[in-house]
Amino acid sequence: MKKLILLSIYFIIICLTNEIYRNKIFKYSYNSFEVNFQKSISKIFKYYFYFFTFLGNEYGLVPIFLIIIYISADLFFILFTIFGFSVYWNGFLKLIYYSPRPFWINDDLFQYCETGYGNPSGHAMISTIFYLGIIEILIQRKKFNKSIGYFLKIICFFVIYNIMLSRIYFGVHSIDQVIYGHLLGLGFYYFFFGIIKIQNFNSNYFISNLIRLKLNIIVIYIISILFSFMFLIFIDYNSKNEKYKSNVMEQCPKSKEYRTFHYEAYYSIFITFGWLGCFLGYIFLNNFIQIENNENEENEYDWYKNKFKIKIIRIGIFLLPSLPCGIFFLFNFKSILKFFLFKTIIPAILGGFCSFGPGIYFELIFIKKYFISEDIKYNIIQNSIDI
């Protein structure tokens, strides 16, 4: 409780500090600092910063998630839980602040298109909790010792701070936005790894407890999503966007409507429906499968260990059931509501569900038939069970 109180005080302090100083720092950032920063850096560094910006966006994180799936599907779910939590709150806070990006105001800063709200920086916030979280969990799972883990954390901070610098360099974030995002990321990192200590949860404990609380979790999740719609009632985003719209559309004429202004924040929030799909998939899986372990600390969901060939095959089987969700992307919808429903929410739910439900179920069937080894014991039963 003491740690939770201290963390709450920490969040209050950084939120109040941000509220007091963000406008002053923002003006200094786009009027002076970022202009001089771009001029002082050789153009060859543009590619250097492109690389680090890539590491902080969804395209850079997808390959990392695929590597995590290769290591362990359950580890993916734990990290995806943390990732979804931070993505939701980043979108939620952007709806509260609806802050412009520096290049929306100062045309000279434009180098890179970003058309959603800027505060807090999603790259800074999500990369902080995500990269540090991976290292923390792998240390706990003894993938390497603590000394190497600390060295890797130093590398993580180097990557994170370069991601933050890249966002400033491209004029898509101000100094206050990246610092605020980073400090929020550190707070959420401490919440998960210092208070909840999620790194100590083996897969059996984490997933089985979520399944026990399935109704509560689903209700809380739905309420959280509905709560985010409250801002549409109290804030007239269209009038707020009007003074930036012409400039943004001139600089980024190819930007899709769903990635602009407050729509981009909702897009981020709706992407977390993928986590809900994964969770529903695990509930489905729980109704069909019971895995028996020896009395050791093996995780119940690590049934595909050791063999490289098994891991490659199981990734294919894992992803295959979610491929039909790609059909949704063949259709175009002019209505933004239809777009979010049919090209974001439904594909995210079905993709997560199919991979973590039928996908893992078929993996077990396949591996049992062709690759079963003596040290892995499990039963597949046809009736519902409670873990």
Image (spheres, rainbow, N blue to C red):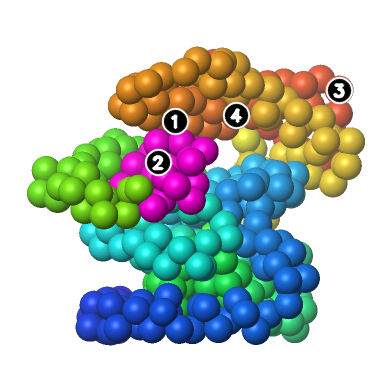
Residue that carries the numbered disc 2 in the rendered image? 267
Judged by its main secondary structure, the magenta piece is: helix
Q: From the viewer's perspective, tell me whether residue 311 is left or right of residue 213.
A: right
Report the front residue among 96 and 349: 96
Q: Is mark 4 on a helix, strand or loop?
A: helix
Is disc 1 placed on a helix, strand or loop? helix
User: Does the rendering let one see residue 358?
Assistant: no
Q: In this view, does 83 lie above or below 381?
A: below
- Give above or below for 145 relative to 278: below
Between marks 3 and 4, how big is the CA–CA gap?
A: 21 Å
User: Does the magenta run of residues contain 274?
Assistant: yes
Cα–Cα gap, marks 3 and 1: 36 Å
Numbered disc in front, either 1 or 4: 1
Badge 4 is on which residue? 355
Q: Are marks 3 and 4 in contact (CB under 8 Å)?
A: no
N-terminal of the pair, mark 1 or mark 4, is: 1
Marker disc for residue 225: none
- Name the quadrant of the N terminus: bottom left
Q: Distance between the residues labelled 4 and 2?
A: 22 Å
Q: Which mark is residue 370?
A: 3
At label 3, the amino acid type is: Tyr
Q: Who's the residue at 55% across and 83% down the image? A: 36
* Spatial CA span between label 1 and label 2: 8 Å
State which region is magenta.
247-276
Q: Could you tell which of marks 3 and 1 lies nearer the N-terminus? A: 1
Which of discs 3 and 4 lies nearer the camera? The answer is 4
Magenta-span inclusion, residue 285: no
Q: Is residue 119 above or below residue 10?
A: above
Question: Which residue corresponds to the image point at 41% horizontal and 51% vertical from the top-left?
Answer: 248
